[in-house]
Amino acid sequence: MSDHIHIIVTGAKEKARTILLSRKKLKLGLALSVGLICAAVVGAIITTRLFIENSNLNAQVSAMNLKLIESTQESRNYADRIDDLLSQNTSQTAMFQAEKEELVNKTLVEFNKRNKLIEDIMKNIGVKIKKHKPTTNSGGPYIPPSESLQEDLLLRTDKNLDLLRRTPLGRPLSGSISSPFGYREDPVNGKKGFHAGVDMQAKRGGKIFATADGTVTQASYNGDYGNFIEIRHGNGFTTHFAHLQKFKVKKGMKVKRGQVIGLVGSSGRSTGAHLHYELCLKGQPINPVAFMQTAKLSKITIEDINVVASKKIIASAPSSKKSLQSHFTKISAVAVKIKKKISPTASTIN
């Protein structure tokens, strides 16, 4: 068998031409053609796939860039909100401080007035207010008066209020005085004698009130005094209540001004239902009338200073702190949101 292939090509003029081809070369050419075609097809597939992947990547980059733009804008909005909150916080802090200073100044003026009133009351009834004297064994940094004025006034008020609470003021009951303090004709034997207190008319069973804060040192039967109560108030003052029908307190109890301590009776050396009321200073009986006449003034002073004014100063600071804390909480919440909104991946894209 021949290794060659004869191809006869006939022209238009019926001329024939013979082409001699080698079988091996023909097979090699066909194989090479098929290989090129396959390579071309594979190349087209790879190119198409890379194009699709590239398109997807471009779409992802575009989406991430858009997200970055949105996050940046949102971050700017949050930053603007923080600036607004900080501005509001600064202005409200200044406003709270101004209101607090105004309230404190007004309260201090009121303290001065009420302190003067207390001191005038004490002076008129003969109670001396001790002034502070520096001790020899003391020291510390010097603070000018202008810087310690408020503290000094508050300390003065505390001392005056304590003195006021422990000074027997007002009436132990509402009845009128039937027998005054001092020398009188004894109601039992008709002889002249010294009366160490005042007798006050009242119905049997009427309520008897403490005239100052203190401690009950006696609540028992005491000879001619009958059922007898003694209250020690401090500052040298004690009060005595005699001829009671019934006790409402016991020895050792702490009592407040206005507290019911017993009921009116006629026990002991007595001609009828009444209250014998004594006021003693350093163990010596004194006329309680001047002290009994200060009831309304002492009540006003206690309510205005101890209840109203003190609460105003204390209440001013907490309200401002609460409002400031609310603003700081808002700012912190916004800052947390900003951190969450900004994507770490998106922020690295240029």
Image (tube, grey):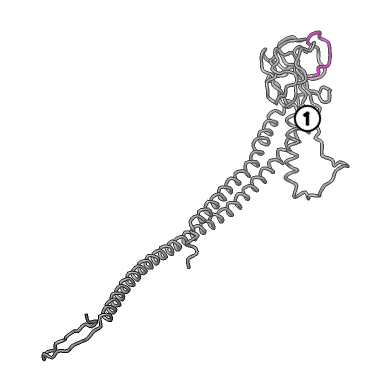
154 is higher (above) or lower (below) than 197:
below
Q: Position of residue 341 (x, y in %)?
A: 48, 56
Q: Position of residue 105 (x, y in %)?
A: 67, 46
Of the pair 97 and 26, the residue shown nearer to us: 26
248 is higher (above) or lower (below) than 8:
above
Q: Position of residue 323 (x, y in %)?
A: 57, 47
Magenta stretch secondary structure, dominant = loop
Q: Residues within 10 Å of mark 1 (few under 14, many from 20)?
A: some
- Residue extending furthest toward the top: 189
- Give the SS element for disc 1: loop
Quadrant hosting residue 176: top right
Q: Which residue lies at the image location 75% right of the left edge and 40% below the top edge?
A: 155
Of the pair 121 and 31, the residue shown nearer to us: 31
Q: Position of residue 40 (x, y in %)?
A: 31, 74
- Tell me how many marks there are: 1
- Which amino acid type corresponds to the residue marked 1 in the rendered image? Ile
Tell me the quarter of the image containing the N terminus: bottom left
Magenta stretch: includes residue 104: no
- Residue extending furthest toward the right: 136
Magenta stretch: includes residue 190: yes
Q: Which residue is mark 1?
A: 125
Q: Which residue lies at the image location 68% right of the left edge and 41% below the top edge?
A: 110
Is residue 286 rendered to the left or right of residue 47?
Answer: right
- Residue extending furthest toward the front: 1
Quadrant hosting residue 206: top right
Please provide the residue range marked out in magenta.
Answer: 187-196
